[in-house]
Image (cartoon, rainbow, N blue to C red):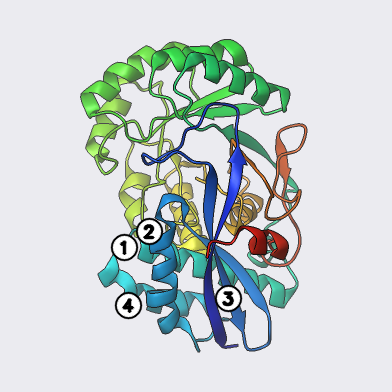
Amino acid sequence: MRITRIEAIPVAVPIHHDGPPTGFGGVIWSALTHVLVRVETEDGRIGWGEAFGYNIAPATVAAVEQTLAPLALGRDATDIAALIEDLARHLHLFGRAGPAQYALSGLDIALWDLAGKRAGLPVAALLGGGGRPRVPAYTSLLRLNAAEHVRKACAKARERGFGAVKLHEITIETVAAAREVLGDAIALMLDVNCAWRPAEALAMARRLLPYDLRWLEEPVWPPEDLAGLARLRSALPGMKLAAGENIGNAWQFRPLAASPALDFLQPSVTKMGGISGFLKVALQAELHGKELAPHSPYFGPGLLASLQMAALFPAIEMIECFGVTLEAPFFGPVGLPEADGAITIPTGPGIGADPDPEVIRRYRVT
């Protein structure tokens, strides 16, 4: 079944959250820009994927349409492994991480969506799993920068039924405020986005011990400093560490999986090779006794693909749910947390649902 069309569709949906204007990457976010990847085959079927977007969306769109699509058009969509391997070889000159890899990830998710639709099965069932109907979610808050804002957001997270909360703060005061509001029963994670050099990370991690973090995420700059992470893990064996959202492909996960530095691997399905890449990382995690905590602060097909992986791998304890509200969700209620803080895994064919065409039309970036 040949691929007849590949389209990158940037969609910027306004957001609301429990705090003042904030964002990541030095940009204040009033909207999230998702890069949807629409793939059509000669039988008229359409598959949906997602390539990492947000601040870098224009570069990702260009990578899909100008670099990836000319190589993939006319190719067989049914042999996913062969096609993705061949494209990866052609694209490696343009980076084994970053926009070229994001584009490949979006295509891969769309191909798996198509495979599930042809079989009439959700991706998890197609891969031999899928018995898990729901997965607990944790809310992943934007950086709020002040204890008062953290208290308010954590109180609302508790009211919404979440059993776990992740912060993106970099001060002890904000973490203390979160723990004060959440109490001991709600798990607390902290992602500092590679804020500290190793010595500073160790000093801060010691000060964080009283707040009983489920994990400390990406504490060391640069993220490639696995030796720095290992020194931190060795000095504080009671502090669990997580990393992986900045890893560009499954091969680059090998040293992380093998290292005693990390407890949790965090593959990001829209960044590091889509579902095919995720499967390879999941195998590495199992062989090395690591836990999987997917990086999935998405609302588009990247989230649904991550939910299919949660259905396939029961070892995934929780799924990340971005701590913002979209003005118009892509899939209606599908993929959103319910009153008890869990998400029902969609069982429609492919990744589980198609995005609402009206949402795409209304918020498409032209």
- Few, some or many C-alpha atoms within 10 Å of disc 4 (few <14, some 14-19, many ≥20)? few
Q: Which residue is depicted at the point 68% across and 70% down? A: 116
Q: Earlier in the sequence, mark 2 or mark 3?
A: 3
Q: Is the residue under label 1 in contact with that under label 2 (CB below 8 Å)?
A: yes
Identify the residue shown where x is 50% and y is 65%: 106
- Whichever of callouts 2 and 4 sits on the residue coming sooner in the sequence is 4
Q: Cβ–Cβ below 8 Å for labels 4 and 1?
A: no
Give the amino acid type for the residue marked by disc 2 in the picture.
Asn
How far is the residue under mark 4 from the one under mark 1?
11 Å
Q: Nearer the viewer, mark 2 or mark 3?
A: 3
The residue labelled by disc 2 is 249
Query: Is 162 located above or below residue 295 in the figure?
Result: above
Q: Earlier in the sequence, mark 1 or mark 3?
A: 3
| Nearest the eye: 140 or 275 | 140
Residue 32, given in percent of the width and then of the height, sits at 53, 48
Query: Dot 2 surroundings within 10 Å: few (below 14), some, or many (20 or more)?
Result: many
Residue 317 can be seen in this image = no
Distance between mark 2 and mark 4 Cα atoms: 15 Å
Q: CA distance from mark 1 to mark 3?
A: 22 Å
In the rendered structure, find residue 39 and report the number of the disc placed on it: 3
Give the structural element (helix, strand or loop) at label 3: strand
| 23 left or right, relative to 196 | right
First in sequence: mark 2 vs mark 1 = 1
Image position, residue 269 (x, y; %): 50, 55
The residue labelled by disc 4 is 90
Residue sitting at x 65%, y 18%: 155
Mark 4 against mark 3, which lies toward the viewer?
A: 3
Q: Quadrant of the N terminus?
A: bottom right
Tell me how far mark 2 sits from mark 1, CA to CA. 7 Å
Q: CA distance from mark 4 to mark 3?
A: 19 Å
> Three-letter amino acid code at disc 3?
Val
Q: Which numbered disc flags the more N-terminal residue, 4 or 1?
A: 4
